[in-house]
Structure formats: C-alpha cells, structure tokens
Image (cartoon, rainbow, N blue to C red):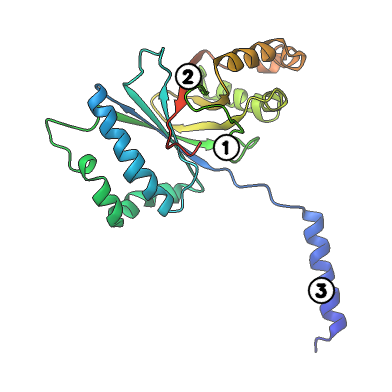
Amino acid sequence: MWNYLSLFVVSFAFFQFSAYAGPQAPKREFFEIRIYHLSGKAQEERMENYLKNAYLPALRRAGIKNIGVFKPVESDTAFGKRIYVFTPMSSLDQLAKLPQALDKDKQYQTAGKDYLESEFKDPTYVRYETILLQAFSGMPQHQKPALDAPRSERVYELRSYESPSEKRYLNKVKMFNTGGEIGIFNKLGFNAVFYGEVLAGRRMPNLMYMTAFANKASRDEHWKAFSNDPDWGKLKDVPEYKDNMNKLEMFHLRPTEYSDI
C-alpha cells in the first residue's frame, strides 16, 4: 500500500526528471503568405474592406492571432496592385480546417458578402497565390516587431532566397539556424518577424524571412551594419556555406492600419 513516504519519493523523482529534461522548445509554427494581385484602386478598396471587416475578424474568432497585412511601398511599381497577408498558425491541421470554420461563421458570411459573391465580370481580385512555410528551428515562433514609428513610415522587408538544389537549400537553412546568421540579425536589431522554410510555393527550393524597420533610413543603416559586421564577414567565407543560393528577391512593404503586425 502506498504511504506518504512512497508518494514523496515518486513526486521527488518526477520533479527531478522534469528539471533534468528542461523546458520543451516551442513548437515550430506554420505560416501562410497569401498575395492578392489586383487590377487597380477599385479592387484594392474592395479587398481591404473584406480583409479589415470580414477575414481578419473571422480568423481571430477562429483562434488565429497576429495576422499581418502589408502593401508595397509607394515607390514600388506594384503599389496599389498587391496585398500581402501573413497568417501564423500552430499546425497544418489549423490551416486545413480554416475553410470549414469560415463557412460556419455567420458574421464572416455577412461581412464578406461582396468578396464571397462577387460577379463573374466584376471579381474582387485578379488572382491570388499562396506560399506555405514552416518556421526555422532557430526561431520557431513569429514575433511582433518593437516599432513605435508611424505605420506610414515603417518598412517591412520580405526576402526570398532560392537555391539551385535541395541540398544547397538545406545548407542555407543550416547557415541561419546553427551557422549563426539569425544571431547576427538579432545582435544588430533587425526586428525579424519570421524565418521560414517554404514547403509549397511557386518557386522552389526556397526560404523566406521578414525583417522590420522604423523607416527606409533605418533599413539602409541596418543593412550597412550587417555588411560591415565582423561575424558576418567570417560566416560568409566559411567554405561549407559557399554557393548555397542563387536568387534573391526583396519586397519592401508597409503595414496597413488594421494589420496586427
């Protein structure tokens, strides 16, 4: 029969094991980046009405938080023609069940009627593309950047790195995770929102990440500091990490006034 001494011994052993095992690392999130392509101002206004008043509120009711909505900076030729929606999720199952949750959400159905029931000859968008990512092990969860500058001045930089082969792509991911590249960005205050391995997208193999800055001048200063950083100087010359990417794309974005990030 159990007695208090036995219970004490078992409890003590359990807590000792827990302390030895240490805290579990956070689970790696999944991200969806949806890019809406628009024909002009009319579609842009309709899309923004849908996102602000229907889609984002419905996602929040479904338990999804920190949705980012961004548009190209004014100097970009895509200004007024694209909207980027960043949605962090705890699992792929959450993503798979989202359409069903939206279908059952009466508030969403009402608020999103113009989008959901758009006419054949008067669609709300031209097309949209979806990119599915999983967070890097080196930063398993997204972060809201600590910025207090006006949203109209902030610059969110979305970068896409493509590699010539899967092996070289994995090497570039390793360079971020264990090679120290994420650490350099953290040291220099780049305000990273996420780093992600692209699981499915238009361009593969591919990784993407987003950093955030108070304004363009701050963005330029940060990248200059990165280029001159001695740790980066050493890392980029490590033979193991040579030739692990062959295409870079950069997108400079601003958050909308209703974006959570």
Disc 2 to disc 1, C-alpha distance:
17 Å
Q: Which mark is residue 144?
A: 1
Callout 1–callout 3 Cβ contact below 8 Å = no
Q: Count numbered badges in the picture.
A: 3
Q: Residues within 10 Å of mark 2 (few under 14, many from 20)?
A: many
Q: Which residue is mark 2?
A: 252
Residue at the location (31% across, 56% down)?
105
Residue at the location (32% across, 45% down)?
54
Marked residue nearer the N-terminal end (3 or 2):
3
Disc 3 to disc 2, C-alpha distance:
57 Å
Q: Which residue is mark 3?
A: 10
Q: Amino acid at mark 3?
A: Val
Residue 232 screen position, x and y as percent: 71, 16
Vertical relation: 223 (above or below) 184: above
Q: Secondary structure at mark 3?
A: helix
> Disc 3 vs disc 2: which is toward the camera?
2
Disc 1 to disc 3, C-alpha distance:
42 Å
Q: Amino acid at mark 1?
A: Lys
Q: Is residue 208 left or right of residue 57?
A: right
